[in-house]
Amino acid sequence: MGYSLLIQPASSTPKYRQIVEGIVRGIRSREIGEHERLPSINEFSAAYDVSRDTVEKAYRQLKSQGVVISVPGKGYFTSPCAYPQMKNVLLLFNKVSAYKRAILEGFIDVVGDQVNIDFQFYYDDFKLFEKILKEKAGKYSDYVIIPSFKWSEEACASRMINELLPLDKVWILNSQLGGLQGLAGAVYQDYEHDIQGALDKARSLLSRYQRLILVFPTYSNYSRGIIRGFQRFAIESGAEWKVIYKDIEEHEIVRDTAYVTILDHDLVALVKKMRQKNWEAGRDIGILAYNDSPLKEVLLDGITVMSTDHHEMGATIARMILENDRSHKENTFNLIVRNSL
């Protein structure tokens, strides 16, 4: 046995209990492997300077707990029953991005080596999602899915998940997906409420501009709740507003306007157009972007963002899986003010 115990003679815990607890810890941490042979009573007694009676009492306790088994003529071995079965989790994400990486990092920070993880991406392609789900159904203990579908595809995706997967082992991330009978756990964003609340927090900054424009291309798979939340804020604040349903490249930007961009490539295109006019963010136009990233921290000395905490999202869903918590939790959403507004 390569695992080393620490026996403390001065401890109030009896030595046999220290042996029991030490071996159980080694098994839980997997420093002691399955079917691994433990030292014989004589070997243990000599190695740790404890009496044979103490070791024998500890081994009897471990046997009664089902932690070890004894094989006549061969010795004591760890019992396979003492090892909790590792969860095998499929993370089925819609695309690769910095935000998905943050979710993964949050997930791994919580589960560590307690869970086996498999990654699959369907790149916002419903047909590929269908193919992966059919191939992977029944092969994992838990399924974490980020839904990103056009409105006409959402019902089909829900029906497919219902038919192929046990809903008490399904976890939905980022957006709620209707039709799952309330059994699947979820960590979600309330897009309409979140964006309206973030804009309200930025009200004094936005009031410096004559108009407010949301850039939301129609092909985007982001929730239309963003549009509704934007419109509610604009109407309630009495601001002049507009939604552009195409890429910003096709739009002539206007001074004294605060632009809200959802897609990163629209943010980049907006910055290029601004520079061509020798305008300055935070003075000539305002820029408010969706979802934070390291690039947005430094671009133009800082882009103001409204963003969910993706690391927290991954950590929360990981804890829910480990605890079999199938509740629905709304994720934190923040306004981060920087120099662009």
Image (spheres, rainbow, N blue to C red):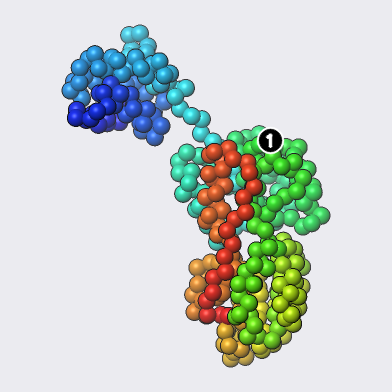
| Image quadrant occupied by the C terminus | bottom right
Residue at 45 percent across and 41 percent down: it is 113
Image coords of residue 106 (percent x, y): 50, 52
**44 or 54, which lies in front?**
54
Query: What residue is pinned by disc 1?
Result: 166
Residue at 50 percent across and 53 percent down: it is 105
Asked if residue 189 shows in the view, the reply is yes
Q: Is residue 66 left or right of residue 214?
A: left
Other residues around mark 1 within 10 Å, as few (<14) / some (14–19) / many (≥20): some
Image coords of residue 321 (percent x, y): 56, 41
User: In this rendering, is residue 231 above or below 168?
Assistant: below
Residue at 72 percent across and 37 percent down: it is 164
Q: Is residue 175 left or right of residue 306?
A: right
**46 or 316, which lies in front?**
316
Q: How many marks?
A: 1
User: In this rendering, is residue 16 above or below 199?
Assistant: above
User: In this rendering, is residue 207 above or below 200?
Assistant: below
Image coords of residue 33 (percent x, y): 39, 28
